[in-house]
Every structure is written in structure tokens, then in C-alpha cells.
Amino acid sequence: MKSDLDDLPVIATRRDEAQGFFQSIVSKGVNWGRKYSLFQYPFVTACCGMEYMSLQMARYDLDRFGAAAPRFTPRQADLLMVVGTINCKQAPVLRRVYEQMAEPKWVMAFGVCASSGGFYDNYATVQGIDRIIPVDVYVPGCPPRPEQVIDAIMLLQKKVQGQPHRLFERKSLPVLAQGDGR
Amino acid sequence: MSKAVIDALVQRFPDAVRDPYVGVGGDDCAFVKRERIAEVCRALKGELGFDMAPYVTAVDYLGQSPRFEVVYNLHATKANARVRLRVKVDEGEEIPSVTAVWRGADWHERYCFDMYGIRFSGHPDLRRLLMYEEFEGNPLRKDYPLRGRQPLVQEREIHDLFRGPGPATRD
Amino acid sequence: MAHARGTAETERKAAPPAPRPESDLDAPLPTKRMVLNMGPSHPATHGVTKFLVELDGETVADVKVEIGFLHRGFEKSCENATWTQVFPYTDRLNYVSSIMNNVGYALAVEKLCKIDVPERAKYLRVIASELHRICDHLTLVGATGLELGAMTIVIFAVEARDLVWDRLTELCGARLTSNYARIGGVARDLPEGWIEKTSKTLDRVAEVRDEIDGLLTRNRIFLDRTRGVGVISREDAIDYGFTGPCLRATGEAYDVRKASPYLVYDRLDFDVPVGTNGDTFDRYLIRLEELRQSDRIVRQALAQAEPGEIVISDFRYALPPKPLVYGTIEGVMAHFKQMMEGVKVPAGEAYSYTEAANGELGFYLVSDGGGRPYKIGIRAPVWPMLMALPSMAKGRLLADLVPVYDSINYIAGEVEQ
């Protein structure tokens, strides 16, 4: 299942490049707001959940990065943190939760089981959630230390800041060799 | 005390309980015939006080016949005694369920059914416990491949550095 | 009554009306039962259990528990790993108290191999196990508080847990999944100054525990939500196979550490709390009391442990020390054989059980004489409690399902192996 993140245009048309100063200012502002107010959906399954608990609490506080409020409904969340192993029985559930989230949404693969299946290379485990949904940031570790996850949140914030934001969405045009609509 | 229990069982059910032995660490064990296991368990619970069945599991001895073995680890709380019963079951054979004796054996038997394919007759709700219904096969059998994944969701093509290029279902 | 005056003639001709209840508000309205899915991804199901709750209004008529959403193929993976490589897999069973899984598995393998560990290794195993038991009970008390709305409790509990994890990081290398025990002993010895640091940490944990106690135990709301909720009788509990704090809450004083002592528990002086009612509140109280007892055990063990070997010197089962590996031919060969082929455990089968944080954690091992396990079966302590959950929750309100489910301390890793 492909999402628009898979279809990034290879060559930007001149019209796209000439987005304009105003649009980039708006982008910066909107992305600034988005990155400092990430509402997470912690899709917690396994051991990494314990580190997630530590992450939320007083010592390694995720609230400092604005990502405090776990919204336990995907409809209100921006960041899907897949914490722990996803196995083949849970995969459709994860897919459905991802599809229920509204754009813009980001996915963090928390832990090595979510990133690549971990050492559970067997009949039951999905070898990485990127086989099911597109992932923005991968956090290895079994379980990752909370500091690692905070680093990942900061990386994600950098990514969010850099995302282009169009004032109005156009249907994506096919890739053209040269611009001017030829 | 468990030795006395095993001896009492052998006396009571001479044709069903055989080959009692003392395993490593002093565990008292015996083999029980498949059809009579429910009877033996009822006697164990009723008269000999074995009121808890902490663990019931199965082992796949591929190559031997009968192929499977269902192992009952039982515990008597008042006397603090433990006993192990081993029942040999062949492929396709059914074994009477002991859920009526101990309700706690319910999920353990479902697990054996799910993972090994051993059917328990008289079980109130024999269906898969851990695997999903669409899964075909019994994963813990020795002839089931370790990596025999049966994905429920169409998997995306990703750049897999570990496995190299190829379709998602190649492993 | 009111309208009969107006239609007296029609009333006399029609059949006499059925007797009306006092008020329309009291009339019983038949309703259909609603099946609510508390799905696999739910904050209150600790991860991955699916409840199909059949509701009659707000009362639970039936609960069907569906598990399997974290089945990671532990048994099959372990059949393809050597006996020592199984330790990280066992860590992730009950991941909140990993060392107890490690120790349980190591004891099972040692039972099959008929070897005995050195004294210091036994003490170290007990110390690490009890520290992880403290973590487990803190996590549970915190989660109970969190799901009943008392968020402060979880913040305190996680603070205390983080402090204990700091000590365990210094000991094992990892906060959570420790991989500490080995066949024949433990992986490493206590670092310098660890004993004093741990005593201070335990003091701080005791302070936090007393604060949590003060906040919850006589709290009106907590009592209302947990007292009398999720009651199970002693006979039912034994029939289902309950062990551990949930069984002791019903009044049956069974603790594996006292009944069949293993490691050095017979030399340590501690009490086992036993409840009376078998409800959620008793389970919570027992866990709080076990926090105190574990603290006692750790302090005694730290005082009693003598310096010594931490792994047996038998090279068939334990890796030789590095100077021998690099210096002698026998060391190299032993190291090589163990790494490549695995420890050769004699053929046979054994069931070994220990008292984990939730109850009796059993390992049933079958060996065919080789370096890899032929079968590893785990007896998850929480299965009986999950089996009994429908009977504990039936007839109560939907909101009572959450504290009952919390109090059984469902840890997905061990349930779904």
C-alpha cells in the first residue's frame, strides 16, 4: 500500500520551485507548530512499552518536546509510535489504526522489533512495520534507552520542519523531464 | 509423597498407568494411556488431592510413533506434592479433555491444539488460542518451517538490506 | 387512570387494561445486549488483549478474552538457538521482571544438567530477582493508579522504578532486559560500591512506596473501585490454577519460595502476605506488602553474601574465564564448543518452577542431548487469571473490568510467549 510519501516527484517543475517566499514562510510557521505539538498515539505492545512509560514520566520527560499528550484515538493523533513487536495477527489492526489517522501523520518505529522484526525472525512476527505502513523515523534498541527515543523525536522534529506545505493541494502531476507543461 | 501417589495410581489403574519413574530432580512421573487420562485425572483430583493443574503441554517427537506426547504437570496444594503424567498421542488421534476436572487446563489444551494440532474430545471450546483463524498449520510441529510466515496484510516492497532484493514474501 | 375518565364507554367495551406499574419510569425495558470490543490496541488493556464484552446496559454479562496479538514464537525461536542463546528470549517473557525469567530458565537447565551453582551466584540471583520483583510490583501499582485516574501514582512508581533500574544497569548492562543469569551462575559480579548505592536506592524506594500507600490505601475512591470487585473464591482460584499474589489474595498461603525453597530463600527471613477476600483491593495490598518483603530480602541477601565464584568451574556448562581461553588449549576448545554447538545438556525432561512476580513461572524443558533445546514450554503465571477473568468480571459494571484486569498483572510477553 503506497502513500503519498512514496510518490515524491523526482524532478520538481519550475512551477513548484517558484513556490514563493510567502508560501515558505507559511510552511515554516505551520511546521513549527506541528513539530512542537505532536500528539502521539502510543501503539504499545511489548517490552518497549516499559521504556515508553519511563519516557513519559518525570525523569525523561517527553512533555519538554511538546509531545506530552497521548491521544488514545488515532483520529486525534499525529504521531503513531509503534512501540514493541507487531506480529502477523496484530498487523491488520496496525494498518487500520494508521489509516484512521488524519493527515499530516508521522510514524515512529520504536524499538528494533518495530524497525526490523528484532531477533524474532519466525513465523509469527512482521519483519519491521515498514512492511505494512511507511515509517518516518526508526529507533533501534531492545529496548531503546529513553535518551535514544528523545533523539528520535528531535530528528522527527527536524524532518517535520523541512516538509513542504502547499497552500492548496493539487493532484500530483506526472514527472516531467522539462517544465512549462510540455 | 508423590511416589506414594504414583504407586497408588499404578495399583488403582494397572492397565492405564505404566512405567512410573523418578525423573531428574526427584520428579515423580508416569505414563498414562490415552483413553483413560480423564479417569486417572479425576481420581487424582478427587481422592488424592491434586487440585491444581499448573501446566499441560505437548511435545512433538517427530520420527517416533506415536508422534506427540501430552504432558500434565499436576500439583496438590495441601500436600505440596507434584506429579507428572505423560500421555502418548499419535497424529490424528483424539485425547479426552481434562477441562471438566480442572478448569485451568482449558487454555493449555487450546494451546496444544493450536500449536500441535492435537484434538481434545470433550473440550468446551476448542479453537485456536494464539494464532489467528486464517493460519494454516500448526507452528510448533517440527516439520513446520521456522520462518513460515502467513501474513494477513499485503506487505509493502521495501529496501531490505538484510535479505537483499526480492519480493516481500521471499523469507 | 387519567384518560379512563374521558373514554369511559370505549373502556367498558374493550378488554380491561393490564395493571400499570407505579410509574412508567420503573417499567422494565427489555434491551438487547451490546457487544463492545475493547480492542487489541487499547490503553487499558496493557497492550494487546482483546475483550469482547457483552453488555447489558452497563453491566457486564460476559467477557470473551482473545489473546495472541503478541505471540512472538518464543518456543520455536528457542528450538533454533543454543541453550545459552535462549536467555535473551526469556528476558522478554515477563519483561518487567526479566531476571526472574532468566533465573527460572537457568534453574530448569541446571536441574536437567544436575549441576549446582556456587553460593555467591545464588545470592546474586536472589538479589537481582527481588530487585526486579520490586520493579514489577511498582509498575503494577502505578498502572492501577493510572487506569483508575490517579496519575500521580504512576509518576511516583516510575520514578522509583527508574532508580532501581539505574542500579540494575550498573549490574547487568541493561535497564529492562537484563540477560543476567547464565547456566551455572550469573554473568557478572557486583560492581564497586554497588551495595551502598543499592541501600540508598532501596531507602528512596521505600519512601516512594510509603507515599503511594498513603495516597491509595485509604483513599475513598480507590476503595470504592477496588473493594469487592473481581472476587474469586479460593476453590475456584485453585481450580483455575492461580498462583502467586492473586492466589494469596483469596486466602491460600502458597508461595513457592516457602513451599519448595530454591536458591537461598530458606536462609532468608521474610513473610508472605496472605489476603482474605480475593478481590482487587487485596491483590493490591498484597503487592504493596510484597514490596516491603522484597526490600527485606535484598538487604539480608546483601549482608549475607560472601565473596566467591559466580559461575561453576565446569567447562562443559559454563564458559571458561578469559585468561584460560587465551592461554590454554582446553580453554579454547571448551569455549569454541560451547559457542558453536551450545552447552550439551543431557537428554531428558524436567519441569522447574519458581515464584515470579505474578505467580509460579514454570519451565518444562525437553533435551535430546544436543546443544539446542528440543522443547521449551513456559508456564505463564497469568494464564489462569485470564481464564478466570470472565467469572471475575461477570455481573459487575463495565468500569470494574479495568481494575480487575489491572490487578492480575497481565504482562503480554509471558502470556503470549
Image (cartoon, coloured by chain):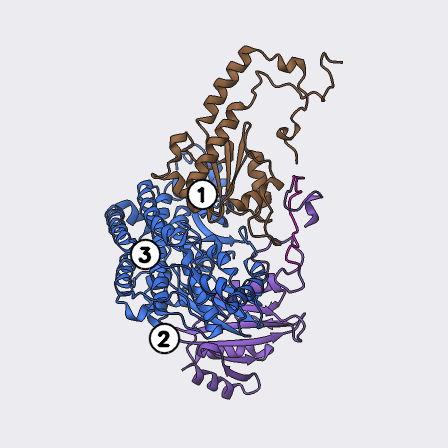
Magenta span main SS: loop
The percent position of residue B124, horizontal first and vertical second, equals 55, 64
Residue beneath the point at 66% across and 59% down: B145
Which residue is tagged 1? C43
In the rendered image, residue B152 lying in the magenta stretch gets the answer: yes
Q: Which residue has dot 3 on it?
A: C287
Assess whether residue C231 is covered by the magenta stretch. Answer: no
Look at the numbered disc 2 and give the secondary structure of its residue.
loop
Front residue of A157/B65: it is A157
Above or below residue C255? Residue C229 is above
Residue C351 is situated, as x and y percent measured from the top left of the image, at 48, 71
Residue C28 visible (yes or no) = no
Looking at the rendered structure, whether the residues under marks 2 and 1 are on a common chain is answered as: no
Q: Position of residue A108 (x, y in %)?
A: 52, 37
Residue stretch in magenta = B145-159
At 34% across and 44% down in the image, what residue appears? C154
Front position among marks 3 and 2: 3
Q: Answer yes or no: do the residues labelled 2 and 1 have beta carbons within 8 Å?
A: no
Crowding near the residue tagged with mark 3, few <14, some 14–19, many ≥20 C-alpha atoms within 10 Å: many
Alpha carbons under labels 2 and 1: distance apart: 39 Å
In the rendered view, would you say C115 is above or below C197?
A: below
The chain letter corresponding to purple is B
| Count of residue discs | 3
- In space, the residues marked 3 and 2 are separated at their CA atoms by 24 Å
**Chain at tag 2:** B
Do tags 1 and 3 sit on the same chain?
A: yes
Chain letter matching colour blue: C
The chain under label 3 reads C
- Residue that carries the numbered disc 2 in the rendered image: B78
Amino acid type, callout 2 = Lys
